[in-house]
Image: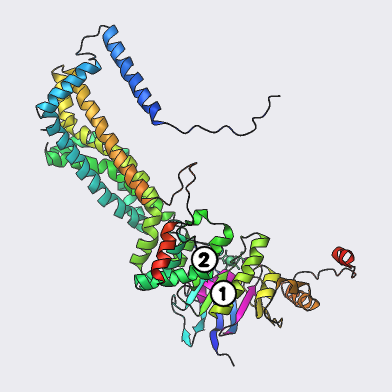
Amino acid sequence: MPSTLLDIRHLTVVYAGEGRAPDLPVLDDLSFAVDEGAFVAILGPSGCGKSTLLRVLAGLLPPTRGQVWLAGRPVQGPQRQVGMVFQNANLLPWRTVLGNILLPLQVQGVPEAQARRRAYDMVRLVGLEGFEDTLPRDLSGGMAQRVALARALVHNPRLLLLDEPFANLDALTRESMWGELLRLWHTQRQTVLMVTHSITEALLLADRVLVLGPRPARLRLDLRVPLPRPRHEAMRFTPRFGHLAEEVRAALGLRRAPRPAPQPLPWDTIAG
Amino acid sequence: MAALPRTFPRLPAPSRRYEALSIAVGLALWWAVARLSGLPPFILPTPGQVLRRGWDALQSGLLLRHTWVTLQEVLVGLSLGVLLGAPLGYALAKSRRLERIFAPYIVASQAVPVVAIAPLLIIWFGPGMQSKVLITVLITFFPLLMNTLVGVRSVPEEMYHLLCSLGARRWQVLRYLEIPAALPMFFSGLRIAATLSVVGAVVGEFIAAREGLGLLINEARGRYDTALVFVGVLTLMVLALGLYAAVRYAEKRLLTWQRRNGQAVVTGPGPRASSFVKEATP
Ligand SMILES: Nc1ncnc2c1ncn2[C@@H]1O[C@H](COP(=O)(O)OP(=O)(O)OP(=O)(O)O)[C@@H](O)[C@H]1O
Ligand SMILES: [Mg+2]
């Protein structure tokens, strides 16, 4: 039995309105627990409070009510056990690839030599050898996001928080990043919480998908994804995947996709 | 309809030769006007007369003595301007309340021309270096303050989130985020302040001084020694240009990460990286 790493109890967040603006309730009495080593995807309509949830989990924002427990302790501020990847890579433009990956270790006061060795390991792990001294402006979107992943993992956090990490990438790069992320997850064995807008991405990567409702967000669906691992992209064309996707779509309040009559696909005829 | 060019015309790479040529043409024009117009030297001396007067002033030690005084005023004033403007700009960037408290004084200090306040400072602090330094501080600290303020305010919130999520302390946020992020804006303020600092010192010296290039120019004018006036003005120009060049140099050295316009900077796999890997993995 895996132990519980993250326990969220009756979490409520209300942004206080400035001046005459009314208070904005964002998260409403949210409770769920995440096992150590799990990969959880979070889906929800835009503006429902997904980024807010991650900010609370990272200790950047105190909850209005309720608590967050991480590894048996209440979260009361930023944690070394947490790594975070933001929607845009959010790299410091004046630091090279290596410098950006070094940042968490420098902040935590890891001795220089040791920090550099560790950062080089991470550079290799995300496949950026030879680009250590490159500045962010000269990286492609995919490379920048890999640097962001390396930076989030360099201090070996137990919990990895990803806020729409691949939203700004083109479709092809995004698919290759899925493989990249799964590979990292297999080698590093972090617990991952990933916010995404893509049902496919959620189902292909995660063990479990949480769907939040519109603001103030409550839990709409807590779905286990029983697809076998290792996952591969072709799985999204299986009927099982289709059923899971339907369930998520329903929870998001999207209309049921019309099901076309089964027809032979062009390549079937050619190959056949 | 005119045919479109097959490629966009490229601006030719600027060459140093054009600058030299431009200066040469300017000098030639000056010489021609001074010679051919028949104006007496106390109205318009020729370049040659100015050069000779400059050489004399240099040999007698007169020029160096006055230049040294002005340079000191400029450097001390500019340094104090930085020491005052940058931290205050940072403080105001971090606190709207402080901004409110200081805003009236800052705006007022800029609305009044320095030339108008300068006599007051000379009454209070005397005709020595002190008053000139103060005028220079007054004139340089505003662009430094404003640029630092805007630079610090422009740090994206997400980057603060990043540093906070790592558990960074205040000084670490300052060191790893705010200073590097605000540096480009600070430097554009420093460039402005560097040229203004020379103006500040000379304005003070014009009103009352015992030494300095402003005094030299003022006295030479009184004696109709127009060639010496030219020498003083040209020295000020060299001073301002030198200061500006020094700031630009420091800026280029410190801000290599900023892309210079239109200049492709080759980076990527480099020898430094690979050699380190070899060192790190025996
Ligand atoms: N610092 C803040 N102060 C006040 N309101 C905020 C703040 N941050 C976010 N909000 C509001 O809270 C709501 C939820 O924001 P949040 O960024 O968590 O949404 P999200 O689910 O991540 O949206 P998206 O999918 O578009 O990224 C939004 O309506 C937003 O305007
Ligand atoms: Mg968001």
Query: Is residue B178 positioned above or below A263 on the image?
Result: above
**Residue neighbourhood size for the residue with mark 1, other residues' Cα within 10 Å, grouped as few (<14), some (14–19), many (≥20):** some
Please name the amino acid that badge 2 sits on: Ala
Asked if residue A16 can be seen in this view, the reply is no
B222 horizontally vs B248: left or right = left
Residue A98, position as x, y percentages in the image: 44, 63
Residue located beneath label 2 in the image: A148
Query: What residue appears at the point 53 percent right and 75 percent down from the top-left corner?
Result: A160
Q: Total label count?
A: 2
Asked if residue B208 can be seen in this view, the reply is yes
Does the closest atom of ligand 2 sit within 8 Å of the Cβ of label 1? no
Q: Quadrant of residue A34?
A: bottom right
Q: Which of the two marks, 2 or 1, is nearer to us in this view?
A: 1
Q: Which residues are magenta?
A: A34-61
**Where's the C terminus of chain B, which quadrant?**
bottom left
Q: CA distance from mark 2 to mark 1?
A: 13 Å
Mark 1 secondary-structure assignment = helix
**Where's the N terminus of chain B, which quadrant?**
top right
Residue located beneath label 1 in the image: A184
Mark 2 secondary-structure assignment = helix
Residue A256, position as x, y percentages in the image: 81, 71
Pointers 2 and 1 in contact (CB under 8 A)? no
Query: Is residue A90 positioned above or below A29 on the image?
Result: above
Foreground of the two, A166 or B132? A166
Q: Specify whether residue A100 is painted magenta.
A: no
Query: What residue appears at the point 40 percent right and 60 percent down from the top-left corner?
Result: B177
A270 horizontally vs B268: left or right = right
Q: Specify whether residue A45 is painted magenta.
A: yes
Reading the chain from its start, which is encountered first: label 2 or label 1? 2
**Residue neighbourhood size for the residue with mark 2, other residues' Cα within 10 Å, grouped as few (<14), some (14–19), many (≥20):** many
Please name the amino acid that badge 1 sits on: Leu
